[in-house]
Image (tube, helix red, strand yellow):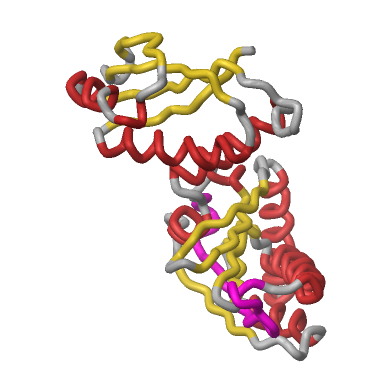
């Protein structure tokens, strides 16, 4: 009777966790950063950021597998990607079903791929993973679970930095605006900034990066008492424009104690 009670508790735990996970807003994104001149490809559920950390999932499960034939950049070729996708699908299915786990993302770099899950129970995860990797006998792997109540692995390993998040949002905006095509024309683009001090704002405006911009507004944010700045220029907005201009504006404003808040356009 005691065993039956424990089993029923486990079933209830998984069902409750799965129901809770279904209420979360999921927003998957893949982005690439450079680490020591090598690419790191990260696939992460951005939608979990507003809920993280989930207090009832204080443990992280990290699964690492070696790539069988990484290219010179440490990334898998097309053929191995098919195998990795099948492995990921089976791993997610198993850990969600038997552990009540939540899959939050993975990264690939230097010939390895790591998968990250959060859960409230780590009792059977190795048994589940053993079953998964039995169908991939050619792949080396290892796994560990540990306490991570603050979700540091999600927030610091997988979730994008403020600049990378800005780039992701900007590239998404291109798709929404339908601007990423050869027939695009120059439009007026407005850039929004905030500074802790007026002197920092003035110093930023004197930098070469601001040449060619029109100053549209100097104001104050009444909520946080920061000094606001709105500047604009005529630009052809496309992927190259995003990758070339946004990092510079972001980093130069940050050097002056400022915050680049984003951009909008007007036809």
Magenta-highlighted residues? 54-75
Q: In terms of image quadrants, where is residue 82?
A: bottom right
| Res 94 seen here | no
Q: Looking at the image, is 144 positioned above or below residue 199?
A: below
Q: Residue 232: x percent and y percent?
A: 46, 17
Q: Is residue 1 left or right of residue 47?
A: right
Q: In terms of image quadrants, where is residue 218?
A: top left
Callout count: 0
Q: Residue furthest left?
A: 199
Q: Is residue 146 magenta?
A: no
Q: Residue 223: x percent and y percent?
A: 33, 16
Q: Residue 138: x percent and y percent?
A: 75, 90
Q: Looking at the image, is 43 positioned above or below residue 215?
A: below
Q: Residue at x 31, y 37 (%)?
A: 254
Secondary structure that dominates the magenta span: loop
Q: Residue 221: x percent and y percent?
A: 33, 14
Quadrant assignment for the C terminus: top right
Q: Is residue 146 left or right of residue 179?
A: left
Q: In terms of image quadrants, where is residue 75?
A: bottom right
Q: Is residue 85 left or right of residue 232?
A: right
Q: Is residue 63 magenta?
A: yes
Q: Residue at x 59, y 46 (%)?
A: 46
The foreground one among 248 and 170 is 248
Quadrant assignment for the N terminus: bottom right
Q: Residue at x 26, y 17 (%)?
A: 225
| Res 74 seen here | yes
Q: Residue at x 75, y 32 (%)?
A: 182
């Amino acid at each position: 009777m005691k065993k039956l009670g424990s089993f029923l508790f486990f079933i209830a735990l998984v069902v409750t966790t799965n129901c809770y996970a279904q209420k979360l807003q999921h927003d998957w994104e893949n982005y690439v950063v450079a680490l020591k001149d090598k690419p790191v490809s990260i696939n992460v559920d951005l939608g979990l950021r507003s809920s993280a950390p989930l207090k009832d999932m204080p443990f992280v499960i990290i699964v690492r597998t070696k790539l069988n034939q990484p290219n010179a950049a440490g990334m898998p070729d097309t053929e191995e990607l098919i195998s990795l996708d099948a492995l990921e699908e089976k791993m997610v299915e198993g850990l969600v079903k038997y552990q009540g786990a939540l899959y939050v993302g993975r990264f690939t770099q230097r010939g390895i791929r790591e998968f990250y899950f959060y859960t409230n129970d780590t009792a059977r995860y190795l048994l589940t993973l053993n079953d998964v990797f039995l169908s991939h006998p050619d792949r080396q792997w290892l796994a560990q679970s540990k306490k991570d109540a603050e979700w540091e692995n999600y927030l610091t390993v997988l979730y994008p930095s403020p600049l990378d998040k800005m780039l992701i949002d900007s590239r998404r905006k291109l798709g929404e605006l339908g601007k990423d095509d050869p027939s695009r024309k120059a439009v007026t683009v407005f850039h929004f900034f905030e500074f802790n001090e007026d002197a920092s704002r003035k110093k930023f405006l004197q930098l070469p990066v601001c040449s060619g911009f029109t100053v549209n507004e100097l104001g104050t944010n009444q909520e946080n008492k920061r000094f606001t700045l709105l500047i604009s220029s005529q630009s052809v907005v496309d992927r190259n424009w995003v990758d070339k201009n946004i990092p510079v504006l972001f980093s130069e404003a940050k050097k002056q104690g400022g915050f680049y808040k984003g951009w909008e356009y007007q036809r």
